Amino acid sequence: MGFTEILGYSAGAITALTFLPQVIKTWKEKSAKDISLLMFVIAAINEIMWIWYGALLNNWVIILTNSIVLAMSSTMIYLKLRYK
C-alpha cells in the first residue's frame, strides 16, 4: 500500500468519525431537541450519492468512508425521531 492509499484511508477514517461524538452524546443524554433533523437528512442523501459515485469508480476509500458516515447519519435521524 502506497502513500496515496494510506493518506486516503487515514482521511477517510477521520471523516467517518465526524458524527460519532454527536451520536454518543445524543445516545447518552437521550435527548435530540437541539439537533437539526434536516442537517442529518441532507447528510444521509449526500452520503448515498458519494457511495454511488465511489461504486462507479470502484473506489473503496469513498465507499467505506461514506458508508460509515451514512450509518451515523441514519442513527442520528433515528435518535432524533425517537427522542423528539
Image (spheres, rainbow, N blue to C red):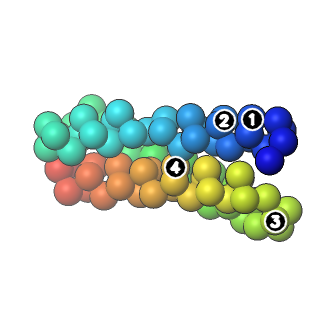
Q: Position of residue 35 (x, y in %)?
A: 32, 37
Task: Tell me the CA gap for discs 1 and 4.
Answer: 18 Å
69, above or below 10, in the image:
below
Task: Tell me the CA gap for discs 2 and 4.
Answer: 13 Å
Pointer 1 residue: 7
How many other residues sit within 10 Å of disc 4, few (<14), some (14-19) or many (≥20)?
many
How many other residues sit within 10 Å of disc 1, few (<14), some (14-19) or many (≥20)?
few
Mark 4 element type: helix
Find out whether the residues at labels 2 and 3 contact each other: C-beta distance under 8 Å: no
Find out whether the residues at labels 1 and 3 contact each other: C-beta distance under 8 Å: no
82, above or below 37, in the image:
below
How many other residues sit within 10 Å of disc 3, few (<14), some (14-19) or many (≥20)?
few
58 or 5: nearer the eye? 5
Find out whether the residues at labels 4 and 3 contact each other: C-beta distance under 8 Å: no
Q: Residue drawn at (27%, 49%), measured in percent from left and top?
A: 80
Q: Amino acid at mark 2?
A: Ala
Q: Amino acid at mark 4?
A: Val
Mark 1 element type: helix
Q: Residue drawn at (35%, 33%), measured in percent from left and top?
A: 21
Mark 3 element type: loop
Instruction: Please give the label number shown on residue 52.
Output: none
Instruction: Answer left or right for 82 relative to 75.
Output: left
Task: Tell me the CA gap for discs 1 and 2.
Answer: 6 Å
Pointer 3 residue: 58
Pointer 4 residue: 69
